[in-house]
Image (spheres, helix red, strand yellow):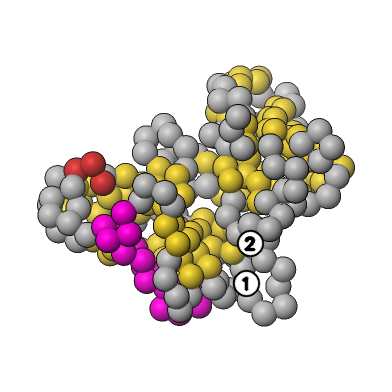
Amino acid sequence: GAVVSQHPSRVICKSGTSVKIECRSLDFQATTMFWYRQFPKQSLMLMATSNEGSKATYEQGVEKDKFLINHASLTLSTLTVTSAHPEDSSFYICSARDQSPGRIARAQYFGPGTRLLVL
Amino acid sequence: QKEVEQNSGPLSVPEGAIASLNCTYSDRVSQSFFWYRQYSGKSPELIMSIYSNGDKEDGRFTAQLNKASQYVSLLIRDSQPSDSATYLCAVKPGGGNKLTFGTGTQLKVEL
């Protein structure tokens, strides 16, 4: 299957700082990527859909000014958690669908996730 | 009614048995169906996809889809302790771009 990487895998930061998480599709093109958040023992929650070359689409209740998404190329999307607070501590996971030319984009592949702890 | 429903479990099966995981969905025009496995503390891993009615087999895994009943299932044959994880059912609607996930079923394979 297609490979999606995320960096960093784990980050600890102080309250009020900003944290950037990178998501890369390693062997395919992804015009659309997805950002999820998962709290312990809870299900995946879609935060936003990242669109290459245009603005992200945020789910209801997700603050776009707090969670900045940039999708500058066909293989890279970034999520920046601005002015992070302890309640932002969570497992952030990106996902991408293989949308290379000629491929039927169906299956969605997940990155390994980034565990964020805000002190 | 939730869009994608799964029994949260835990579902406990003995090693070597068949584990049967079920999922129902509400959107009749859904076209694509996926099963993901998520180990504790890890991200979801795609294990099966199915797009048409019937069965699809891949190794010890069989996905079954019945669009008339809006039902998709995953069978795991010869269950192993390493199969112990949460299994997420995901559905992609016909005209949409996003996957809708169920809350997952926790499977425990006991020695």
Q: Nearer the viewer, residue A107 or A47?
A: A47
Provide the chain ID for the residue under circle 1: A
Q: Distance of mark 2 from mark 1, alpha carbons?
A: 13 Å
Kindly state the secondary structure of the residue where label 2 is placed.
loop
Please, what is the three-letter code of the amino acid marked with disc 1? Answer: Gln
> Count of labels shown?
2
* Residue drawn at x 63%, y 57% as measured from the top left: B96
Please, what is the three-letter code of the amino acid marked with disc 2? Answer: Gly
| Principal secondary structure, stretch drawn in magenta | strand
- Pick whichever of labels 2 and 1 is earlier in the sequence: 2
Q: Which mark is residue A19?
A: none
* Residue drawn at x 48%, y 70% as measured from the top left: A51
Q: Nearer the viewer, residue B35 or B42?
A: B35
The answer to whether any part of residue B109 appears in the image is no
For the record, the magenta segment spans A63-79
Kindly state the secondary structure of the residue where label 1 is placed.
loop
Report the side of B106 relative to A69 (left or right).
Answer: right
Report the side of B9 relative to A54 (left or right).
Answer: right
Q: Which residue is mark 1?
A: A99
Q: Nearer the viewer, residue B99 or B59?
A: B99
Residue A61 lies, with reference to residue B5, above or below; the image says below
Q: Is residue A72 magenta?
A: yes
Q: Which residue is mark 2?
A: A1
Residue A74 lies, with reference to residue A107, above or below; the image says below
Mark 1 Cα shell of 10 Å, populated few (<14), some (14-19), many (≥20): some
